[in-house]
Amino acid sequence: MADLTPFALLGLPERFALSEELVQKGWMNAIARVHPDRFAGRPAAERRVAEQWAGRINEARDELVDPVRRASALLRLRGEDTGSETDTRMDGAFLMQQMLWREQAESLRASGGTLEPLLAAIGAEREKLIAALVDSLDANPDTARAREAVRRLMFVEKIRRDIERGAQN
């Protein structure tokens, strides 16, 4: 079980360009085979194994639905790491953009302005990074470019979540 990739568990190709619908379909097919309810009348050992498989299949779905985690999984399969734990270097212009987004969010909250245009701009940057990942992981493999794009996407996703959470408070 530990040897299977999240892609293999869901019967999906090892590529970045996977729609959420395709991941869900793969998950439904996989979980149907091992769902614990199917093993209700079976011995305890079989039920435990089914529960373990179901847990691993659920983890695979969660990993493949999230673009950052999916890209990171592909990089790991290619012998690369995102370096997010140890490599904190980031392009100065990108760092400035992050600070600007945070300042704009703060200013908009203080003035009672709407965050939608700011979130749309952040969403546009997210889409650019996802397109870069499709290109660098699938179309024209370039792990260095993919690594940089996934690291940037991590930051963009965090800023987006932080701003959305702040809007709800």
Image (tube, rainbow, N blue to C red):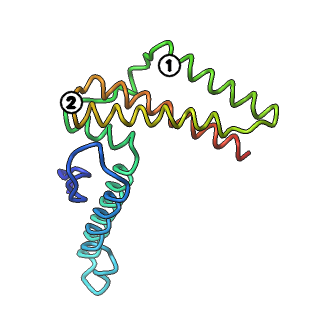
Please, what secondary structure does the residue beneath circle 2 have?
loop
Q: Please provide percent x and percent y for residue 153.
A: 44, 32
Residue closer to the observer: 59 or 129? 129
**For the image shown, how many numbered marks are present on the structure?**
2
Please, what secondary structure does the residue beneath circle 1 have?
helix
Q: Please provide percent x and percent y for residue 157.
A: 50, 37
Q: Residue furthest top?
A: 92
Q: Residue furthest bottom?
A: 41
Cα–Cα span, label 2 and label 1: 23 Å
Q: Is residue 115 left or right of residue 161?
A: right
Mark 2 packing: few (<14 Cα in 10 Å), some, or many (20+)? few
Q: Residue at x 58, y 40 (%)?
A: 161
In the depicted structure, whether residue 153 falls above or below residue 6: above
User: Which dot marks residue 141?
Assistant: 2
Q: Please provide percent x and percent y for residue 37.
A: 34, 80
* Amino acid at the residue labelled 2: Pro
In the depicted structure, whether residue 72 falls above or below residue 83: below
Reading the image, the residue beneath label 1 is: 94
Q: Quadrant of the C terminus?
A: top right
Looking at the image, is mark 2 or mark 1 earlier in the sequence? 1
Q: Quadrant of the N terminus?
A: bottom left
* Amino acid at the residue labelled 1: Phe
User: Which dot marks residue 152?
Assistant: none
Q: Please provide percent x and percent y for residue 73.
A: 29, 41
Mark 1 packing: few (<14 Cα in 10 Å), some, or many (20+)? few
Q: Residue at x 35, y 61 (%)?
A: 24
In the depicted structure, whether residue 153 falls above or below residue 90: below
Where residue 98 sits, quadrant-wise, is top right
Q: Residue at x 25, y 69 (%)?
A: 49
